[in-house]
Image (cartoon, rainbow, N blue to C red):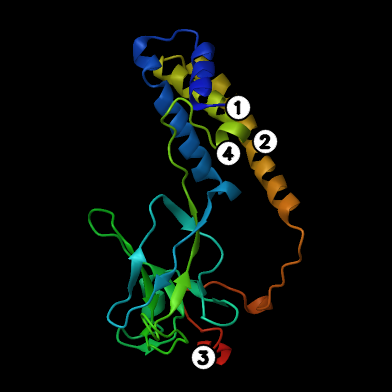
């Protein structure tokens, strides 16, 4: 298991000329390599889900987009108080939902929209249509629907010298070679930068393959795609709710 400190030390050993300005950047270069890797490929370790979200009759806003959010994975789903979960769909745009719903339409949840950000980059997850308060929940928030949404998140940056995560264990060579390449670039050594960048590209393929093998090795059950050919995402041109939610209760 490699730690943040060990990876930084190995980068420093590989840079021929390590002036103070480059040395001060090494930790940041390692974290930039970590972010680049997660941007390039969505790894299993990045899988997450929202907390249980509860609808409200007065607003489409369901919750803020989670911190460190990268992208959605799979489908959001409705959680009845009794019975199996019910898949929803992601709306690809506001235009898609507005071609299917008026702003004041009510009914069971059908589509989740990642809404447009404001000037500060804050954005909400919206649920369409508005709740008709017909869920099978009683007590607090009776009649309101419960929803969860799977997504991929970025892991926190490394900070403490002893810090480690899946990537320091399984992608240490990528972090080292990619950060080393950028260190040479800061040192104005374009030739060595190109050499180490090529090494990093080789390591990238290895890390992605390792993640794919890990996913396959964990898959011991047959997944049935019950929607078959109809299992498609919400298109901008149309929206056809795949079911009547109330039929499931």
Earlier residue among tags 3 and 1:
1
Q: Badge 2: how crowded within 10 Å, few (<14), some, or many (20+)? A: some
Question: Is disc 1 surrounded by few (<14), some (14 to 19) or many (20+) residues within 10 Å?
Answer: many
The location of residue 174, given as percent across then percent down, is 58, 30
**Secondary element at tag 4:** helix
Residue that mark 1 sits on: 173
The residue sitting at 58% across, 38% down in the picture is 166
Q: Tell me the CA gap for discs 3 and 1.
A: 52 Å
**Where does residue 186 sit, x and y in percent of width and height?**
40, 19
The reply to whether discs 2 and 3 touch (Cβ–Cβ < 8 Å) is: no
Dot 3, how many residues are within 10 Å of its Cα: few (below 14), some (14-19), or many (20+)? few
- Compared to residue 151, the image places residue 31 above or below, namely above
Q: Quadrant of the C terminus?
A: bottom right
**Alpha-carbon span between mark 1 and mark 4:** 13 Å
Residue located at (51% from left, 43% from top): 38
Mark 3 vs mark 1: give the one in front. 3
Residue displayed at 54% across by 17% down:
10
Mark identifier at residue 141: none
Judging by the rendered image, the residue that carries numbered circle 2 is 206
Q: Earlier in the sequence, mark 4 or mark 2?
A: 4
| Label number found at residue 166 | 4
Q: Disc 2 versus disc 3: distance between alpha carbons?
A: 47 Å
**Does label 1 or label 4 sit earlier along the sequence?**
4
């Amino acid at each position: 298991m490699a730690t943040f400190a060990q990876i930084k030390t190995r980068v420093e050993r590989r840079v021929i000329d390590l002036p103070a300005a480059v040395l001060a950047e090494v930790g940041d270069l390692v974290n930039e390599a970590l972010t680049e890797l997660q941007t390039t490929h969505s790894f299993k370790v990045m899988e997450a889900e929202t907390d249980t979200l509860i609808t409200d009759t007065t607003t489409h806003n369901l919750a803020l987009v989670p911190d460190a959010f990268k992208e959605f994975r799979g489908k959001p789903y409705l959680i009845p108080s009794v019975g199996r979960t019910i898949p929803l769909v992601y709306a690809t745009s506001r235009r898609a939902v507005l071609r299917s719903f008026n702003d004041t339409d009510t009914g069971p949840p059908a589509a989740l929209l990642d809404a447009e950000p404001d000037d500060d980059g804050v954005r909400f997850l919206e649920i369409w249509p508005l709740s008709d308060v017909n869920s099978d929940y009683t007590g607090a928030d009776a009649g309101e629907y419960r929803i969860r949404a799977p997504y991929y998140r970025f892991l926190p940056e490394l900070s403490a010298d002893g810090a480690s995560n899946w990537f320091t264990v399984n992608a240490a060579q990528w972090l080292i070679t990619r950060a080393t390449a950028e260190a040479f670039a800061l040192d104005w050594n374009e030739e060595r930068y190109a050499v180490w960048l090529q090494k990093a590209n080789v390591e990238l393929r290895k890390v992605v393959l390792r993640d794919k093998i890990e996913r396959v090795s964990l898959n011991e059950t047959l997944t049935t795609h019950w929607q078959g050919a109809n299992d498609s995402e919400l298109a901008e041109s149309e929206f056809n709710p795949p079911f009547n939610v109330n039929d499931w209760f």
